[in-house]
Image: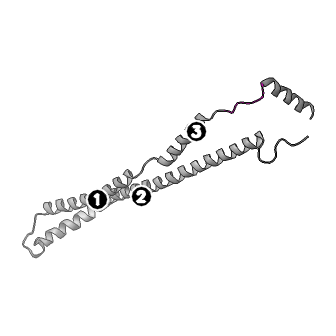
Amino acid sequence: MSDPFDGTERSLGQLVASATAEMSALVHDEIALAKAEIRQDVKRGAIGSAAGIAAAVVLLFSLPMLSFALAYAINTWTGGHNGNGGWNLVWCFLLSFAFNVLVASLLAAIAVAKFKKVKPPERSIASAKQTAAIMQNAKPHPRPESRPALEKASTVARSSV
């Protein structure tokens, strides 16, 4: 008896194995794409978080030292060092505080800009939706043989083992 498969046609088992391997590769590729996109967004988020934390640290820890130093520098710059009195220290401290708030606002603006660049993994979502749409449209191929013929073939195959 001649072999019904002359090398150009594959058996059902080979087709299933090939489809399974291709689906597995597709799923692995989609997962790798999602990981790459998420890794990039996590990096942007980390930079934004670091800038936000830096803004808070600058504002909290530098205010006492910078405020005193800047206030006395302004007082000295306006003539307080030579006995002329200079500006009132209250105004000097207010200017010092305004400068610190300006620096913290700049760092906070950098943090917000970095956070706005964080976005969902759009390519992975689109790829997954495309795969789902293809899988929903996939229909099983009609079988040429009827059900009783398949049962008879499986009975013969089991009895010959």
**Which label belongs to residue 47?**
2
The answer to whether 121 is drawn above or below residue 87 in the figure is above
Q: Using the image as rendered, state which of residue 6 and residue 98 is in the foreground.
A: 6
Q: Secondary structure at mark 3?
A: helix
The quadrant of the rendering that contains the C terminus is top right
- Residue at left 10%, top 66%? 87
Q: Is residue 18 left or right of residue 161?
A: left
How far apart are labels 2 and 3 at the CA level?
Answer: 38 Å
Q: How packed is label 1: few (under 14 Cα within 10 Å), some, or many (20 or more)?
A: few
Measuring from the top left, give residue 57's x and y in whole percent: 34, 58
- Residue at left 14%, top 60%? 90
The answer to whether 76 is drawn above or below residue 118 in the figure is below
Q: How packed is label 3: few (under 14 Cα within 10 Å), some, or many (20 or more)?
A: few
**Which label belongs to residue 106?**
1
| Magenta-drawn stretch contains 123 | no
Measuring from the top left, give residue 28's x and y in whole percent: 62, 49
Residue at the limit of the structure toward the bottom, as seen here: 82
Measuring from the top left, give residue 100's x and y in whole percent: 25, 60
Q: Nearer the viewer, mark 2 or mark 3?
A: 3
Measuring from the top left, give residue 24's x and y in whole percent: 66, 46
How far apart are labels 1 and 2 at the CA level?
Answer: 15 Å
Q: How packed is label 2: few (under 14 Cα within 10 Å), some, or many (20 or more)?
A: some
The amino acid type found where label 1 is placed reads Leu
Residue position for label 3: 134
Question: Are discs 1 and 3 less than 8 Å apart at CB?
Answer: no
Scheme of image coloration? one colour
* Mark nearer the N terminus (2 vs 3): 2
Quadrant assignment, res 144: top right
Question: Are discs 2 and 3 less than 8 Å apart at CB?
Answer: no
Q: Magenta stretch?
A: 140-146
